[in-house]
Amino acid sequence: MAEPEVVPPTGPLGPATALRTDHCGALTIVDADRRVSLCGWVARRREHGEHLAFVDLRDHTGVVQCVVDGASELRAEWVVRITGTVRRRPEGAGNLAIATGEVEVGDAVVEVLSAAEPPPFSLDERGPSTDEAIRLKHRYVDLRRERMQRNLRLRSAVNAAIRRAMDAQGFLEVETPMLMASTPEGARDFLVPSRLKPGSFYALPQSPQLFKQLSMVGGVDRYYQIARCMRDEDLRADRQLEFTQLDAEMSFGGQEDVLQAISHAVRLATAAAGRDLGAIGRISWHDAQERYGSDKPDVRFGMELVELTPLFASTGFNAFRAPCVKAIAVPGGASLGRGRTDALTDLAKGFGAKGLAWLKRHTEAAEGLEGPILKFLSEEERAGLPGEPGDLLLFVADERAVVNKVLGLLRLELGRPPVNEGGLHAVWVVDFPLFDGVDDAGRPMAAHHPFTMPHLEDLDRLEDDPLAVRSQAYDLVLNGWELGSGSVRIHRGDVQQRVFRLLGIGAEEAEQKFGFLLAAFRYGAPPHAGFAFGIDRLVALLAGEENIREVIAFPKTQSGTAPLTGAPAPVAARDLEIYGLRPLPPPI
Ligand code: ASP
């Protein structure tokens, strides 16, 4: 007879196992009088009389106090199994700070499963924070901390919600290769030498971009993948050499379809984290620059840039005779001292301004203004200035792009709330320009990647006025972090050739680099569009973490190393030979 299928009782914490009946963090007064077996690490141990010891036992769900007889051999971080009876703690001995604080496990016996060396740092969340390099070297210890466990669980819940959302919308999960040819995302590739073809290299994917487009030609219709991407670029708080994206692509749809599908996934992921996203806003790239001085506006707070160019059109104040004059009003800034305004001027110069002018507004009336530039302004100009009583007005006059950039950065510096304050405010930034300025050779540079479809209305201007051409590209921005970007793709060979030509990619180079894609397009390419957003960034924002390393199980340091494994490490010359490689002498 066939064995009956045993379905383990699953709860949010998982089923009981051979060694344990319960989880440490889940015990409550409801469990009183139950005999339980718990497994975990010794978080703390305190003597109580000659034989008795209080042992705080920790697993991934939390900590519970156990009262153990004859536990003298127990040390911090030993792995043990404790069996005992749940009981209410004696009057006055409760601990409201922990979820299990009302109970303890009494009459407990301990079985040591693994002894442990003293931990390299204290795991007490309240203790002084440990140097990150040490945390990363012993990440397996660091991950036991409550905060890291919470972040890992959050990330898992977010991934699961994203998968559910994409699945429910008819997207097919397709895995794309890691060993592949270069994808142009604007970063440097990581290369992997081929042993079978010495002297040749694979590139690790900067994204699955080309493959997801190929899968559209392959009739997949809607593709998604929680994809690992590798980009060899300088690291920052929100950037790692390898990161994870929700990558998606859909056929026979346009921008609105993509925005809707992705918004749904982000909304479900946010809900899975127990957070509320609210309505996702929308702003054009142009307006984002004008109002926030950024293509990734943090809309959690106001302090928008105020247009003053018309007000100063015929000004007598030399410093304001410029193509563009704008200001921001900093709430409460009127109380800042001279040292602080001087520091802001230095900061503005560091951001690229020639200078920074300021005025304090004490009252609504023009007479309520104060500051060194006031005497240069006409009555009409004074009357037209913005701000509320108590504000500090900061002015920049320059080329429009410089003004927007500098005031945008000052706005963040002076108004940006900490990552875990101000709620979650997402906004779609649409109508990006197709090109991002010109390179040293005067050639336009792709703002997104070279497969981005221009706005059809702007197609005629492609050759004559490329910098004015808008693209069908869009970004999703959450609390001022660029979560991700996407676009409608070029599926027509003729338009693709024109864009390649403008980018200085000749027919031969195009053939060599993307010949396979262009060939695929000749065999019937559906119109398609897609998007990708960074899961590390989303989870960091949902967790209230400033740094994505806190939500990655095994991240690299800021300098791209892995203290735990020692990667990257040199390879012996003889091991390189099989790849047809020989090392250069080390740089002097
Ligand atoms: N491949 C792009 C990126 O990684 C996203 C996209 O265009 O779908 O940014």
Image: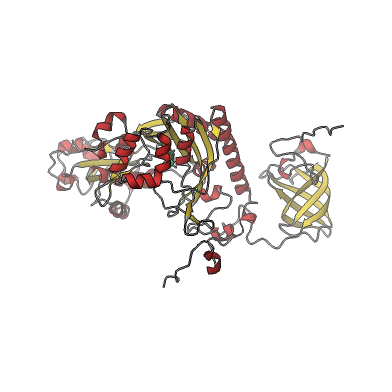
Query: What is the x, y in percent for residue 469?
Result: 28, 36
Q: Is residue 84 left or right of residue 248?
A: right
522 horizontally vs 192: left or right: left
What percent of the width, then of the height, locates residue 118?
A: 69, 62
Report the quarter where the N terminus lies.
top right
Quadrant into which the C terminus falls: bottom left
**Is 586 or 161 nearer to us in this picture?**
586
Direction from residue 119 to residue 218 in the image, left or right: left
Q: Residue furthest right?
A: 1
**Of 385 and 540, which appears nearest the observer?**
540
Instruction: Name which residue lies at 48% across and 67% down.
Output: 582
Question: Which quarter of the rendered image does ligand 1 occupy?
Answer: top left
Judged from this view, the residue extending furthest toward the bottom is: 588
Q: Toward the viewer: 485 or 207? A: 207
Point out residue 272 in the picture as x, y percentages from the top left corner: 58, 34
Above or below: residue 196 compared with residue 495: below
Query: At 40% across and 43% down in the image, what residue appears?
Result: 515
| Colour scheme employed for the rendering of this structure | secondary structure
Residue 123 visible in image: no
Total of numbered circles in the picture?
0
Left or right of 440 in this view: 141: right
Residue 362 occupies quadrant:
top left
Q: Position of residue 207 (x, y in %)?
A: 47, 44
Can I make out residue 138 in this image? yes
Front in this rendered view, residue 291 or 167 = 167
